[in-house]
Image (cartoon, rainbow, N blue to C red):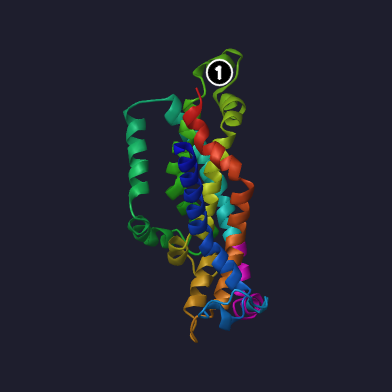
Amino acid sequence: MSDIIERLLKILTIIVIAVWSLFPIAFVVVSSIKPPGDIFAYPPKWLFTPTLQNYVDLWLEFGEFFHTLGNSIIVSIGATVFTTAVGFMAGYVYSRYSGRLIAASALYMIAIRLLPPIVVTLPLFPIVSWLRLSDTHIVLILLYSAFWVSLVTVILKTFIDEIPRELDEAAEIDGASQWQILMRVILPLTAQGLAAGAIFVFIFAWNEFLFALIFTTSQAKTAPLVLSEVMDAIYGTSWGVLFAGVTIQLLPVLLLVVLANRLIVAGLTAGSVKG
């Protein structure tokens, strides 16, 4: 009897969490194909005639949004590749070597990650302007990488810790260089951790707002900034257009999470059960 109650509680908990998590997403997606007058109708209209007019209005009134999606893709992919590469090599160093300098650098890296982003961002503004990097993709890529490299490093260090050092020694005896050990021995065994870290960085970079607001104006402007402009429109917020834009902004992330769901879970849990 107690087993049945425990199972029912687990099922109920899963249902509550699923509804709690999925309701906002479902609300946004459904609202994007509702006529504007039906979006906040009370009582809610569960039956309505779907329309793509909100997407058409988004194209006509905020066509810049689709251009800035290209900037978001460039910045997100660039930050993901750079952060994963740096985090992988840093994770290897922290796993295989020790010393006061390495310990101090690890503490500094984590401390920077714990600070509010605005504290780190504002002092950088005059430096970025002096280097003439304002409103460029590279400045966002570097900032996103600096902010997330600590998490990726910790994830990959955990994976590399679980790889026996004997494999390194065996490869070294066979004549492999340090770089060859890193690329041919360590890299394949940390593929799940690399994937998990890369997905986290991509999602963060895709949705990030503050850094893009401060350091871009037009050339490297990202999609979240245009969505904020939809909310601040002179004639009031066009909620249908806003929900259409948010739905488009959500699609790559949802697709990525669904396709890589098992890989993410395996990547985050494998380090705790190996060995």
Inspect this view and state whether residue 138 appears.
no
> Residue 28 placed where, x, y %?
55, 68
* SS assignment at label 1: helix
Q: Classify mark 1: residues with Cα within 10 Å, few (<14), some (14-19) or many (20+).
A: few
Residue 68 belongs to magenta span: yes
* Residue at image location 61% in from the left, 30% down from the top: 188
Left or right: residue 256 versus residue 205 is right
| The image quarter in which residue 128 lies | bottom left
Residue found at the far top of this picture? 173
| The image quarter in which residue 246 lies | bottom right
Q: Is residue 192 above or below residue 27?
A: above
Residue 233 belongs to magenta span: no
Q: Nearer the viewer, residue 40 or 216?
A: 40
Question: What segment carries the magenta color?
Answer: 55-71
> Residue 29 placed where, x, y %?
59, 67
- Main SS type for the magenta part? helix
Q: Which residue is mark 1?
A: 167
* Residue at image location 49% in from the left, 28% down from the top: 273
Inspect this view and state whether residue 107 appears.
yes
Q: Is residue 151 above or below residue 34?
A: above
Q: Is residue 209 above or below residue 197?
A: below
Q: Nearer the viewer, residue 18 or 158?
A: 18
> Residue 144 placed where, x, y %?
47, 52
Instruction: Indicate the amino acid at tag 1.
Output: Leu
